[in-house]
Amino acid sequence: MAQALVRFLTAQKTVVDGQTVPIFAGVFAIFGHGNVAGIGEALYQARETLPTYRAHNEQSMAHAATAYAKAMRRRRMMACTTSIGPGATNLVTAAAVAHVNRLPLLLLPGDVFANRRPDPVLQQLEDFGDGTVTPNDAFRPVSRYFDRITRPEQIIPALARAMTVLTDPADCGPVTLALCQDVQAEAYDYPASFFEERVWTSRRTRPDEDELAAAVTALKAARKPVIVTGGGTLYSQAEGTLATFAAKHGIPIGETQAGKSAIALDDPLGMGAIGVTGTGAANAVAEEADLVLAVGTRLQDFTTGSWALFKADTHRIIGLNTQPFDASKHRALPLVCDAKVGLELLSHALGDWKAPTSWTDKAIAGREAWLKTASRYTDASNAELPSDAQVIGAVQRVGKPTDIVVCAAGGLPGELHKLWQAGAPGGYHMEYGYSCMGYEIAGGLGVKMAEPDREVIVMVGDGSYLMANSEIATSIMAGAKLTIVVLDNRGYGCINRLQRATGGESFNNLLRDTRHDVLPDIDFAAHAASLGAHAVKVKSLAELEAAVTAARGHSRTSVVVIDTDPLESTDAGGAWWDVAVPEVSQRREVEAAHAAYVQKKTLQRVGD
Ligand SMILES: Cc1ncc(C[n+]2csc(CCOP(=O)(O)OP(=O)(O)O)c2C)c(N)n1
Ligand SMILES: [Mg+2]
């Protein structure tokens, strides 16, 4: 069965830039008794056509696979195989990352013996009341399709369903096929048709005529329209279409975390980031907007300012999305279709219609003002400890338009969303659907595998670095060179700031505020060097610029460490974020924060 499964995977193809290529670029694998003899032996036989990569941590390898699919704009993907038990459940968090971000990821964890003869096998949990439950059931809520293979012929329908989900723009997400150990090794007389080459290309769904007509009517009535662009625009490769659409109809654009990099830096209608971590320019137009054209976005709370950002009473949303669930959020007028197709048809139907010039001009002026404001934060200063924004400024000053910045959690996502100037589509890779600490380095590895000719710069906090760093070694093994900038503010800086903002005492976030005998003084450069990286600690922004420039010339992964200020963040721009504050507390600061919180909550558009 495992041999048949691997052979099936190698027969699945797609078309990228006119070339037919395998849709599975490879398999990340960590073997154990649950997969080494079955899938492991099959992968060995296929090692020339379907490369196997050994990683150091199952969660990290699945992050790398997810990042690969994202960087490939969902056109190609990878599979991950693990043993049963801990190897398998180590994947669950990574499955959730792919699930939230709607990214294709094929997970092949081992599972217990279907024949149950050796029960309980090593690492088998035993449910006292249910003989069918294994820890792999934990994949169910984080998989778009889950199946447990208890007979060899079950992979025939299961893999067909898996491919449908992995390649469907609306349903796309992780697929988990839990492979019972004994079944992996069983023989079955599979039909030859099962192994025939199949080419999967992304479906471009066309809109329903009535939905399109309703969207056109709504747009034509708008006086203050704004576009919110999300990851769906990039997955549809619609960034050029979107820019043309916006220019023709005079509509400013705000970018979500997943959507950032779609709009060129010099586009006068590009307002930059929108929402909680948004620019002053984008949020100003959002607040006034009477119509929001939401393209390929899930409208998560960071985008909508916890649903308090859009303040105009008359506002209306058009949900242009391949997924009806997303298209209908917040009473939106759904326009269920592919982003590129939808924008083209909308534009055609709108004809010469343009938003009022006064609105467009106001947005353009707001953008100019924001760029001046932002540079105040990213310019170098003589402060003893630089802020995250100043580090971003330094990395940007020595950057190239083709660089790709990778990040996921901590204070950096907010700062990068507001301040990073992405030079080309795909140049901003932020995992902010699950914002999973530890994604950064592993994600960088996946991005580099997808884009070997572009410089991949991972920006990561000390906390995320400590949570998952072992794929530094894998990146060196794989020749997937990364530049990793570690911002060491000695703790969970952004959560400490959030704690303070919600009235809390600094507690259990920065290392100095934790219960400890000895305050750790972690030498990140020495650690990275021990994994095989070129590593250096820098003492100033000037040294940082020099080190990042030097890293460009290195053939193996470089880690550049810089101490930063944990208390500073960019206070310009931004919008309110709903984080629940206790109604009752012995701390006066919490009571005050709660009173302010109650005020803010009145701005939320409940049910709207
Ligand atoms: C796996 C995981 N655990 C916990 C969190 C909650 N969290 C978000 S940011 C953060 C601190 C990150 O610290 P660091 O990487 O040093 O970045 P900093 O906040 O200092 O900028 C925590 C604990 C998370 N996002 N992911
Ligand atoms: Mg930190």
Image (cartoon, rainbow, N blue to C red):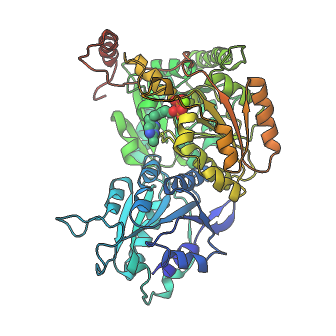
Eyeballing the image, is 308 above or below 533?
A: above
Q: Percent from the top left, x then y, of residue 133?
A: 26, 65
Q: How many marks?
A: 0
Taking the image as shown, residue 127 lies to the left or right of residue 489, namely: left
Residue 93 appears in view: yes
Query: Which is more toward the observer, 343 or 566?
Result: 566
Q: Percent from the top left, x then y, of residue 203?
A: 51, 58
Residue 258 appears in view: no
Q: Percent from the top left, x then y, of residue 82?
A: 47, 65
Query: Which is more toward the observer, 510 or 24?
Result: 510
Image quadrant occupied by the C terminus: top left
Image quadrant occupied by the N terminus: bottom left
Q: Percent from the top left, x then y, of residue 540?
A: 74, 23
| Residue at image location 33% in from the left, 22% down from the top | 604
| Residue at image location 25% in from the left, 69% down from the top | 132
Query: Which is more toward the observer, 518 or 423?
Result: 518
Eyeballing the image, is 503 above or below 551?
A: above
| Residue at image location 29% in from the left, 15% down from the top | 598
Residue 180 quadrant: bottom left
Query: Which is more toward the observer, 607 or 38?
Result: 38
